[in-house]
Image (tube, rainbow, N blue to C red):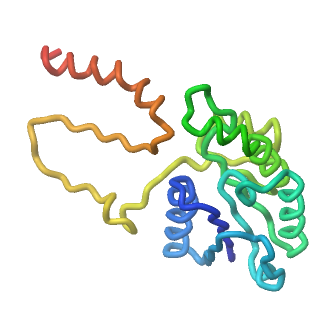
Amino acid sequence: MKVLGVEVSKSGSNYYRLEMPFQHLTQTTDVEYGKCGTLNQFPIEILRQFDYVVYSREIEHYNNVENIKLIANQIHDAGCKLIVDIDDYWELSTYHVLRTEYKIFKAAEKIKESIRVADIVTTTNELLAEKIRKINPNVYVLPNAIYPEIYPQFQPNYQYSDKYRIGYMAGVCHWEDVVLLQEGVKMLHADIVTGK
């Protein structure tokens, strides 16, 4: 199976949801993975060499809805199946750092159209899958994962200590999630201090 990953940006979602998993698959299965930055003016004879084309979130970042349909048709005309990976909800909260940009560029509309035209949609969890099913019923949950056997920075370095350590990793857009964790961390700290 040959997969073309269209990584239109160097985002965390591209890295963790496309590049890492497909690198893992190329090392552990017969999957072949190629990547490019755009399909705009991409030669159809090269596209025909692939079985699947996979995007993160939206087809061709900053394009309009009509172009999304055209590119999806180009992918299908080449005999490829289109996979779109959705790792986050497309309706941003009032406090999200990208909310203004999303409104200006109509990102939610483009993400929903990308979901609509996809043959397969993958996502991180069942709650998000429920929202996606309202647009496209062909959705599969693929939880986030890391691959310590490929990426040494994720290999544990166990060292004995009498202290507790908790790690949390997220992008800058997840500061609201950190706020949600604050109270629980304070309670945990209080329990440790008081010996409960």
- Closer to the camera in the image, 100 or 192: 100
Q: Residue at x 30, y 41 (%)?
A: 167
> As drawn, is 148 to the left or to the right of 135?
left
- Closer to the camera in the image, 190 or 107: 107
> As drawn, is 97 to the left or to the right of 157?
right
Q: Is residue 2 above or below residue 139?
A: below
Give the percent coordinates (x, y) of residue 11: 54, 56
Give the percent coordinates (x, y) of residue 139: 73, 47
The number of discs equals 0
Q: Residue at x 17, y 15 (%)?
A: 196
- Closer to the camera in the image, 34 or 43: 43
Q: Residue at x 50, y 40 (%)?
A: 173
Q: Residue at x 79, y 51 (%)?
A: 114
- Closer to the camera in the image, 45 or 97: 97
Q: Is residue 66 above or below residue 193?
A: below
- Dividing the image into 4 quarters, which one contains the N terminus? bottom right
> As drawn, is 36 to the left or to the right of 73?
left
Give the percent coordinates (x, y) of residue 71: 84, 64
